[in-house]
Amino acid sequence: MTELHFQLGRERELCLYELDNILSLSGYTLQDKGLLLPGVSTNDSNFDPKSLCTPLGGCVRAIERIGDYSEDFLMEVESGAWFLPEGPWAISALDTKLRSEREKLRSSVKTLVKQSDQAHGREERPKPGELDLSPAKVQELGFADTGSELCLWKEGGMILVGITRWVFDTHGFGDRDMNKPFRPRRRGLLPPKLARQMINLGRTPKTWKILDPFCGCGVTLLEGLDLGFQVAGSDNRDEAIKQSAKNVDWYLSQSESASKSSVAFIERIDARQLSTKIAPLSLDLVVGEGDLGPPIQGKLSRKAAAGFSGQLEPLYSRTFAEVRTTLRPGGRVCLAIPFWQPNEGDPIFINIERKLRLIGYEPAFDEKGFEPFLYRRKDQRVGRAIYVLKSPE
Ligand SMILES: C[S@@+](CC[C@H](N)C(=O)[O-])C[C@H]1O[C@@H](n2cnc3c(N)ncnc32)[C@H](O)[C@@H]1O
Protein backbone atom coordinates (compact mmCIF):
# COMPACT_ATOMS: atom_id res chain seq x y z
CA MET A 1 0.00 0.00 0.00
CA THR A 2 1.37 3.42 -0.93
CA GLU A 3 0.12 6.49 0.91
CA LEU A 4 0.98 9.75 -0.81
CA HIS A 5 0.36 13.09 0.92
CA PHE A 6 0.25 16.50 -0.72
CA GLN A 7 1.67 19.73 0.68
CA LEU A 8 -0.58 22.41 -0.79
CA GLY A 9 0.07 25.96 -1.92
CA ARG A 10 -1.36 29.10 -0.36
CA GLU A 11 -4.93 29.33 -1.67
CA ARG A 12 -5.97 26.10 -0.02
CA GLU A 13 -9.47 25.69 -1.43
CA LEU A 14 -8.29 26.28 -4.98
CA CYS A 15 -5.39 23.87 -4.47
CA LEU A 16 -7.68 21.19 -3.01
CA TYR A 17 -10.21 21.33 -5.83
CA GLU A 18 -7.47 21.31 -8.45
CA LEU A 19 -5.80 18.31 -6.83
CA ASP A 20 -9.10 16.49 -6.44
CA ASN A 21 -10.00 17.05 -10.09
CA ILE A 22 -6.61 15.90 -11.39
CA LEU A 23 -6.56 12.82 -9.15
CA SER A 24 -10.04 11.80 -10.17
CA LEU A 25 -9.09 12.09 -13.86
CA SER A 26 -6.48 9.39 -13.13
CA GLY A 27 -8.96 7.28 -11.16
CA TYR A 28 -7.74 8.16 -7.65
CA THR A 29 -9.76 9.63 -4.78
CA LEU A 30 -8.42 12.34 -2.54
CA GLN A 31 -9.07 11.32 1.06
CA ASP A 32 -9.44 13.37 4.20
CA LYS A 33 -9.55 16.79 2.58
CA GLY A 34 -9.55 18.37 6.03
CA LEU A 35 -6.03 17.11 6.80
CA LEU A 36 -3.13 19.53 6.63
CA LEU A 37 -1.62 17.25 3.98
CA PRO A 38 -4.49 15.30 2.40
CA GLY A 39 -3.55 12.15 0.54
CA VAL A 40 -4.34 9.10 -1.55
CA SER A 41 -3.83 5.45 -0.68
CA THR A 42 -3.39 2.86 -3.37
CA ASN A 43 -2.29 -0.72 -4.00
CA ASP A 44 -1.63 0.06 -7.65
CA SER A 45 1.91 -1.16 -8.43
CA ASN A 46 2.13 1.27 -11.39
CA PHE A 47 1.34 4.25 -9.18
CA ASP A 48 3.64 7.05 -10.31
CA PRO A 49 3.64 10.18 -8.11
CA LYS A 50 5.67 12.13 -10.65
CA SER A 51 3.32 11.80 -13.61
CA LEU A 52 0.34 12.30 -11.33
CA CYS A 53 1.66 15.55 -9.82
CA THR A 54 3.49 17.17 -12.75
CA PRO A 55 0.32 18.83 -14.15
CA LEU A 56 -0.45 20.54 -10.83
CA GLY A 57 -0.02 24.27 -10.26
CA GLY A 58 -1.05 24.40 -6.61
CA CYS A 59 0.85 21.57 -4.99
CA VAL A 60 4.28 22.02 -3.41
CA ARG A 61 5.47 18.51 -2.50
CA ALA A 62 4.17 14.96 -2.70
CA ILE A 63 5.40 12.87 0.20
CA GLU A 64 5.11 9.13 0.66
CA ARG A 65 4.33 8.37 4.26
CA ILE A 66 6.71 5.82 5.74
CA GLY A 67 5.70 5.90 9.40
CA ASP A 68 4.73 7.77 12.53
CA TYR A 69 7.37 9.48 14.59
CA SER A 70 8.18 7.67 17.85
CA GLU A 71 11.20 6.35 19.75
CA ASP A 72 10.62 2.95 18.12
CA PHE A 73 10.47 4.55 14.70
CA LEU A 74 13.81 6.31 15.31
CA MET A 75 15.40 2.95 16.16
CA GLU A 76 13.99 1.46 12.98
CA VAL A 77 15.49 4.36 11.01
CA GLU A 78 18.88 3.68 12.61
CA SER A 79 18.64 0.05 11.51
CA GLY A 80 18.04 1.11 7.89
CA ALA A 81 14.51 -0.30 7.79
CA TRP A 82 13.02 2.81 6.17
CA PHE A 83 15.62 4.99 4.56
CA LEU A 84 19.02 4.36 2.99
CA PRO A 85 20.36 7.55 1.45
CA GLU A 86 21.72 6.92 -2.03
CA GLY A 87 23.62 10.17 -1.98
CA PRO A 88 23.30 13.42 -0.03
CA TRP A 89 20.28 13.57 2.24
CA ALA A 90 18.22 16.13 4.18
CA ILE A 91 15.41 16.40 6.70
CA SER A 92 12.70 19.05 6.51
CA ALA A 93 10.09 19.86 9.12
CA LEU A 94 6.95 21.17 7.39
CA ASP A 95 5.85 22.62 10.71
CA THR A 96 8.09 25.01 12.67
CA LYS A 97 7.05 23.41 15.94
CA LEU A 98 8.81 20.16 15.05
CA ARG A 99 12.41 21.34 15.50
CA SER A 100 13.31 18.98 18.35
CA GLU A 101 11.83 15.95 16.53
CA ARG A 102 13.78 16.93 13.44
CA GLU A 103 17.01 17.03 15.45
CA LYS A 104 16.34 13.54 16.83
CA LEU A 105 15.54 12.18 13.39
CA ARG A 106 18.73 13.77 12.03
CA SER A 107 20.79 12.13 14.67
CA SER A 108 19.17 8.75 13.89
CA VAL A 109 19.97 9.15 10.20
CA LYS A 110 23.54 10.14 11.10
CA THR A 111 23.87 6.98 13.18
CA LEU A 112 22.53 4.96 10.24
CA VAL A 113 24.95 6.64 7.83
CA LYS A 114 27.93 5.85 10.09
CA GLN A 115 26.96 2.25 10.70
CA SER A 116 25.49 1.02 7.45
CA ASP A 117 27.92 -0.30 4.83
CA GLN A 118 25.68 0.88 2.02
CA ALA A 119 25.06 4.35 3.42
CA HIS A 120 28.46 4.98 5.00
CA GLY A 121 29.94 8.38 4.18
CA ARG A 122 26.74 9.93 2.78
CA GLU A 123 26.60 13.59 3.65
CA GLU A 124 23.83 15.78 4.90
CA ARG A 125 23.10 18.56 2.39
CA PRO A 126 22.91 21.42 2.57
CA LYS A 127 25.04 21.74 5.66
CA PRO A 128 23.13 22.28 8.92
CA GLY A 129 22.05 25.87 9.29
CA GLU A 130 20.07 25.63 6.06
CA LEU A 131 17.54 23.12 7.29
CA ASP A 132 13.96 22.82 6.02
CA LEU A 133 14.44 22.89 2.30
CA SER A 134 12.39 25.05 -0.03
CA PRO A 135 10.90 23.27 -3.06
CA ALA A 136 13.44 25.11 -5.25
CA LYS A 137 16.31 23.68 -3.19
CA VAL A 138 14.83 20.16 -3.23
CA GLN A 139 14.58 20.43 -7.00
CA GLU A 140 18.11 21.82 -7.35
CA LEU A 141 19.56 19.02 -5.22
CA GLY A 142 17.54 16.39 -7.12
CA PHE A 143 16.19 14.97 -3.86
CA ALA A 144 12.73 14.27 -5.25
CA ASP A 145 14.31 11.95 -7.84
CA THR A 146 16.57 10.12 -5.41
CA GLY A 147 14.13 10.05 -2.49
CA SER A 148 16.70 11.75 -0.27
CA GLU A 149 14.55 14.15 1.69
CA LEU A 150 12.69 13.01 4.78
CA CYS A 151 9.79 15.22 5.90
CA LEU A 152 8.07 15.57 9.23
CA TRP A 153 4.61 17.03 9.69
CA LYS A 154 1.83 17.08 12.25
CA GLU A 155 -1.63 15.67 11.74
CA GLY A 156 -4.01 15.75 14.72
CA GLY A 157 -1.99 14.53 17.69
CA MET A 158 0.45 12.56 15.54
CA ILE A 159 3.74 13.37 13.85
CA LEU A 160 4.11 11.71 10.48
CA VAL A 161 7.29 10.93 8.57
CA GLY A 162 7.60 10.60 4.81
CA ILE A 163 9.95 10.68 1.83
CA THR A 164 9.58 13.37 -0.84
CA ARG A 165 8.65 11.77 -4.16
CA TRP A 166 7.84 14.87 -6.21
CA VAL A 167 8.38 18.58 -5.88
CA PHE A 168 6.94 21.63 -7.64
CA ASP A 169 8.89 22.59 -10.77
CA THR A 170 10.06 26.00 -9.58
CA HIS A 171 12.59 26.32 -12.40
CA GLY A 172 10.15 25.48 -15.20
CA PHE A 173 7.55 27.97 -13.94
CA GLY A 174 10.22 30.62 -13.38
CA ASP A 175 11.48 30.12 -16.92
CA ARG A 176 8.02 30.46 -18.50
CA ASP A 177 7.26 33.43 -16.26
CA MET A 178 10.46 35.45 -16.59
CA ASN A 179 12.21 34.38 -19.81
CA LYS A 180 9.45 34.64 -22.39
CA PRO A 181 10.02 37.52 -24.83
CA PHE A 182 7.07 39.63 -23.66
CA ARG A 183 6.22 40.23 -20.06
CA PRO A 184 4.31 43.51 -19.89
CA ARG A 185 4.68 45.17 -16.53
CA ARG A 186 1.64 47.37 -16.40
CA ARG A 187 -1.27 45.03 -17.05
CA GLY A 188 -2.31 42.58 -14.36
CA LEU A 189 -0.39 39.42 -15.22
CA LEU A 190 -1.94 36.11 -14.40
CA PRO A 191 0.58 34.08 -12.38
CA PRO A 192 1.44 30.93 -14.41
CA LYS A 193 0.69 28.73 -11.39
CA LEU A 194 -2.82 30.16 -11.18
CA ALA A 195 -3.35 29.82 -14.95
CA ARG A 196 -2.41 26.16 -14.62
CA GLN A 197 -4.72 25.66 -11.68
CA MET A 198 -7.57 27.23 -13.61
CA ILE A 199 -7.02 24.92 -16.58
CA ASN A 200 -6.93 21.96 -14.20
CA LEU A 201 -10.15 23.06 -12.51
CA GLY A 202 -11.88 23.24 -15.87
CA ARG A 203 -10.47 19.99 -17.23
CA THR A 204 -12.58 16.94 -17.96
CA PRO A 205 -11.52 13.61 -19.53
CA LYS A 206 -12.64 15.03 -22.90
CA THR A 207 -10.72 18.31 -22.77
CA TRP A 208 -8.57 19.00 -25.83
CA LYS A 209 -9.27 22.41 -27.37
CA ILE A 210 -9.06 25.37 -25.01
CA LEU A 211 -9.51 29.08 -25.63
CA ASP A 212 -8.39 32.09 -23.61
CA PRO A 213 -10.63 34.95 -24.83
CA PHE A 214 -8.55 37.52 -22.85
CA CYS A 215 -5.16 36.08 -23.75
CA GLY A 216 -3.00 39.19 -23.13
CA CYS A 217 0.61 38.05 -23.50
CA GLY A 218 -0.40 34.40 -23.45
CA VAL A 219 0.28 33.05 -19.95
CA THR A 220 -2.69 30.65 -20.14
CA LEU A 221 -1.72 29.58 -23.65
CA LEU A 222 1.77 28.59 -22.50
CA GLU A 223 0.40 26.61 -19.56
CA GLY A 224 -2.19 24.96 -21.82
CA LEU A 225 0.56 23.91 -24.24
CA ASP A 226 2.70 22.68 -21.37
CA LEU A 227 -0.20 20.51 -20.22
CA GLY A 228 -0.49 19.03 -23.72
CA PHE A 229 -3.65 20.75 -24.98
CA GLN A 230 -4.47 22.45 -28.24
CA VAL A 231 -4.78 26.16 -27.47
CA ALA A 232 -6.44 29.17 -29.05
CA GLY A 233 -6.13 32.76 -27.91
CA SER A 234 -8.06 35.95 -28.55
CA ASP A 235 -7.95 39.50 -27.23
CA ASN A 236 -9.32 42.84 -28.41
CA ARG A 237 -5.87 44.49 -28.63
CA ASP A 238 -3.50 44.00 -31.54
CA GLU A 239 -0.53 44.37 -29.24
CA ALA A 240 -1.74 41.47 -27.07
CA ILE A 241 -2.15 39.25 -30.14
CA LYS A 242 1.43 40.01 -31.25
CA GLN A 243 2.79 39.35 -27.77
CA SER A 244 0.89 36.09 -27.36
CA ALA A 245 2.06 34.89 -30.79
CA LYS A 246 5.71 35.68 -29.98
CA ASN A 247 5.53 34.09 -26.55
CA VAL A 248 3.88 30.97 -27.97
CA ASP A 249 6.57 30.73 -30.71
CA TRP A 250 9.23 31.03 -28.02
CA TYR A 251 7.60 28.22 -26.04
CA LEU A 252 7.24 25.98 -29.12
CA SER A 253 10.88 26.55 -30.10
CA GLN A 254 11.99 24.76 -26.94
CA SER A 255 9.20 22.27 -26.43
CA GLU A 256 9.75 18.60 -27.19
CA SER A 257 6.06 17.70 -27.31
CA ALA A 258 4.09 20.75 -28.53
CA SER A 259 4.24 21.90 -32.17
CA LYS A 260 2.58 24.44 -34.47
CA SER A 261 -0.43 22.16 -34.76
CA SER A 262 -0.96 22.59 -30.99
CA VAL A 263 -2.05 26.19 -31.68
CA ALA A 264 -5.50 26.52 -33.30
CA PHE A 265 -5.42 30.33 -33.71
CA ILE A 266 -4.40 33.56 -32.02
CA GLU A 267 -6.69 36.32 -33.27
CA ARG A 268 -8.08 39.70 -32.46
CA ILE A 269 -11.67 39.16 -31.26
CA ASP A 270 -13.77 41.14 -28.83
CA ALA A 271 -14.89 38.70 -26.14
CA ARG A 272 -18.38 40.21 -26.36
CA GLN A 273 -18.58 38.95 -29.95
CA LEU A 274 -16.95 35.53 -29.76
CA SER A 275 -19.87 33.85 -31.51
CA THR A 276 -19.29 35.89 -34.67
CA LYS A 277 -15.87 34.27 -35.17
CA ILE A 278 -15.91 30.95 -33.32
CA ALA A 279 -18.06 27.99 -34.37
CA PRO A 280 -20.82 27.03 -31.95
CA LEU A 281 -20.20 24.04 -29.67
CA SER A 282 -16.56 23.83 -30.82
CA LEU A 283 -14.60 24.34 -27.58
CA ASP A 284 -13.94 22.04 -24.63
CA LEU A 285 -12.74 24.68 -22.19
CA VAL A 286 -12.70 28.46 -22.09
CA VAL A 287 -10.26 29.74 -19.51
CA GLY A 288 -8.65 33.05 -18.67
CA GLU A 289 -8.74 36.29 -16.81
CA GLY A 290 -10.50 39.38 -18.13
CA ASP A 291 -10.18 43.09 -17.53
CA LEU A 292 -9.51 43.69 -13.84
CA GLY A 293 -10.29 47.40 -13.98
CA PRO A 294 -7.77 50.06 -12.99
CA PRO A 295 -4.92 49.10 -10.64
CA ILE A 296 -5.65 50.41 -7.14
CA GLN A 297 -3.09 51.47 -4.61
CA GLY A 298 -3.93 52.84 -1.19
CA LYS A 299 -7.47 53.38 -0.01
CA LEU A 300 -10.64 52.21 -1.72
CA SER A 301 -14.09 53.39 -0.68
CA ARG A 302 -17.15 51.15 -0.96
CA LYS A 303 -18.66 53.62 -3.39
CA ALA A 304 -15.65 53.54 -5.72
CA ALA A 305 -15.56 49.71 -5.58
CA ALA A 306 -19.28 49.51 -6.40
CA GLY A 307 -18.60 51.85 -9.34
CA PHE A 308 -15.88 49.56 -10.79
CA SER A 309 -18.12 46.56 -10.34
CA GLY A 310 -21.00 48.26 -12.16
CA GLN A 311 -18.75 49.35 -15.03
CA LEU A 312 -17.45 45.85 -15.69
CA GLU A 313 -20.73 43.96 -15.23
CA PRO A 314 -21.88 44.33 -18.88
CA LEU A 315 -18.52 43.00 -20.20
CA TYR A 316 -18.80 39.85 -18.15
CA SER A 317 -22.52 39.25 -18.62
CA ARG A 318 -22.01 39.45 -22.36
CA THR A 319 -18.80 37.39 -22.37
CA PHE A 320 -20.27 34.55 -20.32
CA ALA A 321 -23.25 34.43 -22.71
CA GLU A 322 -20.97 34.36 -25.76
CA VAL A 323 -18.70 31.72 -24.25
CA ARG A 324 -21.70 29.48 -23.63
CA THR A 325 -22.49 29.36 -27.37
CA THR A 326 -18.94 28.21 -28.20
CA LEU A 327 -18.80 25.41 -25.60
CA ARG A 328 -19.71 21.86 -26.52
CA PRO A 329 -22.21 20.15 -24.21
CA GLY A 330 -20.32 19.26 -21.04
CA GLY A 331 -17.61 21.82 -21.88
CA ARG A 332 -16.50 24.15 -19.11
CA VAL A 333 -15.61 27.76 -18.52
CA CYS A 334 -13.14 28.84 -15.84
CA LEU A 335 -13.00 32.62 -15.85
CA ALA A 336 -11.36 34.95 -13.34
CA ILE A 337 -13.14 38.27 -12.95
CA PRO A 338 -12.31 41.01 -10.45
CA PHE A 339 -13.72 41.68 -7.02
CA TRP A 340 -12.74 44.53 -4.72
CA GLN A 341 -11.87 44.73 -1.05
CA PRO A 342 -12.68 48.25 0.17
CA ASN A 343 -11.10 49.73 3.32
CA GLU A 344 -14.14 48.73 5.31
CA GLY A 345 -16.69 45.94 5.20
CA ASP A 346 -17.19 42.93 2.98
CA PRO A 347 -15.72 42.52 -0.50
CA ILE A 348 -17.71 43.83 -3.47
CA PHE A 349 -18.38 41.42 -6.33
CA ILE A 350 -19.70 41.85 -9.84
CA ASN A 351 -23.35 40.95 -9.59
CA ILE A 352 -23.48 38.10 -12.07
CA GLU A 353 -24.87 34.95 -10.50
CA ARG A 354 -28.45 35.40 -11.71
CA LYS A 355 -27.20 36.01 -15.27
CA LEU A 356 -25.07 32.87 -15.17
CA ARG A 357 -28.14 30.82 -14.26
CA LEU A 358 -30.23 32.51 -16.96
CA ILE A 359 -27.57 31.86 -19.59
CA GLY A 360 -27.95 28.19 -18.73
CA TYR A 361 -24.72 27.30 -16.99
CA GLU A 362 -24.51 24.62 -14.32
CA PRO A 363 -21.97 24.49 -11.51
CA ALA A 364 -18.90 22.40 -12.34
CA PHE A 365 -18.65 21.30 -8.70
CA ASP A 366 -21.93 20.59 -6.94
CA GLU A 367 -20.63 21.53 -3.48
CA LYS A 368 -19.50 24.96 -4.74
CA GLY A 369 -22.62 25.76 -6.75
CA PHE A 370 -22.33 29.20 -8.38
CA GLU A 371 -19.95 30.46 -5.71
CA PRO A 372 -16.57 31.51 -7.13
CA PHE A 373 -13.13 30.55 -5.79
CA LEU A 374 -11.42 33.61 -4.37
CA TYR A 375 -7.79 34.53 -4.96
CA ARG A 376 -6.38 37.69 -3.41
CA ARG A 377 -3.09 38.64 -1.82
CA LYS A 378 -3.55 40.41 1.52
CA ASP A 379 -2.02 43.66 0.31
CA GLN A 380 -4.15 43.82 -2.86
CA ARG A 381 -7.41 45.73 -3.21
CA VAL A 382 -8.41 43.83 -6.35
CA GLY A 383 -8.88 40.09 -6.10
CA ARG A 384 -9.95 37.43 -8.57
CA ALA A 385 -13.29 35.67 -8.34
CA ILE A 386 -12.88 32.46 -10.32
CA TYR A 387 -16.08 30.94 -11.72
CA VAL A 388 -15.96 27.32 -12.82
CA LEU A 389 -19.13 26.35 -14.68
CA LYS A 390 -20.25 23.86 -17.25
CA SER A 391 -22.49 23.76 -20.24
CA PRO A 392 -25.19 21.11 -19.69
CA GLU A 393 -24.51 17.70 -21.30
C1 LIG B 1 -5.79 41.04 -17.04
S1 LIG B 1 -5.41 40.94 -18.72
C2 LIG B 1 -5.16 39.25 -18.98
C3 LIG B 1 -3.74 38.89 -18.83
C4 LIG B 1 -3.41 37.62 -19.50
N1 LIG B 1 -3.88 36.48 -18.76
C5 LIG B 1 -1.92 37.52 -19.79
O1 LIG B 1 -1.40 36.43 -19.67
O2 LIG B 1 -1.30 38.50 -20.14
C6 LIG B 1 -6.92 41.24 -19.50
C7 LIG B 1 -6.85 41.19 -21.00
O3 LIG B 1 -8.20 41.29 -21.47
C8 LIG B 1 -8.19 42.03 -22.67
N2 LIG B 1 -9.55 42.56 -22.86
C9 LIG B 1 -10.20 43.53 -22.18
N3 LIG B 1 -11.45 43.70 -22.67
C10 LIG B 1 -11.59 42.81 -23.69
C11 LIG B 1 -12.64 42.48 -24.59
N4 LIG B 1 -13.80 43.12 -24.55
N5 LIG B 1 -12.44 41.49 -25.48
C12 LIG B 1 -11.26 40.83 -25.53
N6 LIG B 1 -10.23 41.12 -24.74
C13 LIG B 1 -10.38 42.08 -23.82
C14 LIG B 1 -7.13 43.10 -22.44
O4 LIG B 1 -6.66 43.57 -23.67
C15 LIG B 1 -6.08 42.31 -21.65
O5 LIG B 1 -5.10 41.79 -22.49
Image: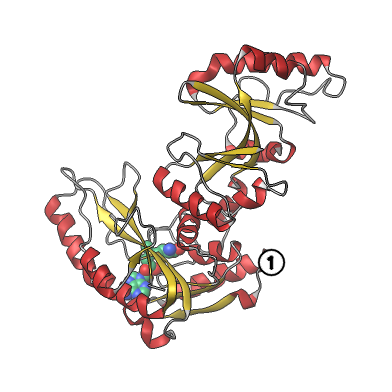
Compared with residue 128, is residue 349 higher up or lower down, i.e. above or below? below
Looking at the rendering, in which quadrant would you find the C terminus? bottom left
Return the residue found at the far left.
303
**Which residue occupies 74% across, 16% down?**
78
For ligand 1, the image quadrant comes to: bottom left
Return the residue found at the far right.
117
Q: Which quarter of the picture shows residue 309?
A: bottom left
Q: Which quarter of the picture shows residue 61?
A: top right
Question: Residue 53 in the image: x percent, y percent?
Answer: 60, 49
Please indicate whether residue 304 sits to the left or right of residue 217 in the image: left
Compared with residue 105, is residue 16 higher up or lower down, i.e. above or below? below
Q: Which quarter of the picture shows residue 369?
A: bottom left
Label 1 belongs to which residue?
257
* Residue nearest the viewer, comparing 210 with 47: 47
Q: How is the image coloured?
A: secondary structure
Q: Is residue 346 visible?
A: yes
**Which residue occupies 41% across, 86% down?**
277
Please indicate whether residue 360 sits to the left or right of residue 82 in the image: left
* Residue nearest the viewer, comparing 10 with 155: 155
Question: Residue 15 in the image: x percent, y percent?
Answer: 46, 47
Please indicate whether residue 387 sits to the left or right of residue 351 in the image: right
* Residue nearest the viewer, comparing 41 with 109: 41
